[in-house]
Image (tube, rainbow, N blue to C red):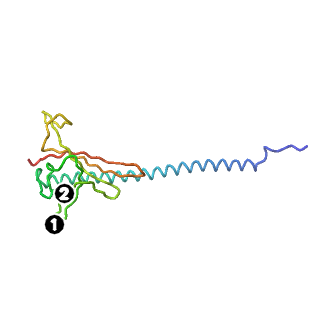
Amino acid sequence: MRQLQIFNNKDGVTVVEIMVAVSILTIALGGILALASFSFVSTDLASQNLQASALAKGTIEALRNYRDGIAWDNDDAGNEYDGLGVLSVGVQYYPEISGDAIPKWKFIQGVETTGIFERSVVFENVERDVLDTITESGGVVDLNTKKATVTVFWEERGRTHSVDLVSYFTNWNK
């Protein structure tokens, strides 16, 4: 009588070991590829966020330059160089450099598109309380201070992202 040698058959165990190893390797590589893909998407989004922040900061700097170069209450007939005290509140503007011999900033109504980004700035009146502190409501409108909210937004993979910067500008030249 011949004894069955099922458990001593090394060929069958080797195939099973190879299948298990391939399965483990496939799962590991899948995880590594998913991590790499997530890393690329995150890096791309971080880069876009930096670019949007730079556009927003550039708009704030353009506003400072504009405020310093144009009288606060200047009412330009062509509405290109109205002072910050004259620009409409609640309206979107964007900065543009003039084509003059000596270039200067001007603010145009609307939203500017730069690559994948859209940027605008909206002005609001500022109220102050009896202690001359800025307050959200219940104060007196300060004609020599404006709140500027710069928004840069873009879409990435069907999601909308934005960077907002808020700054207050005063008529320091009064």
Name the one closer to the observer, 109 or 123: 109
**What x and y, as percent, mark residue 136?**
21, 36
Q: Position of residue 37 (x, y in %)?
A: 48, 52
Name the mark on residue 106: 2
User: In this rendering, would 128 be left or right of 161?
Assistant: left
**Which is closer to the viewer, label 1 or label 2?**
2
Quadrant of the drawing holding the N terminus: top right
Numbered mark located on residue 101 in the image:
1
Q: Residues within 10 Å of mark 2 (few under 14, many from 20)?
A: many
Q: What residue is drawn where x is 31% and y is 58%?
A: 114
Badge 1 element: loop
Q: Earlier in the sequence, mark 1 or mark 2?
A: 1
What type is the residue that disc 1 sits on? Ala
Counting other residues with Cα less than 10 Å from the Cα at mark 1, is it few (<14), some (14-19), or many (20 or more)?
few
**Residue 120 located left or right of residue 28:** left
| Residue at the extreme right of the image, as rendered | 1
C-alpha distance separating marks 1 and 2: 14 Å
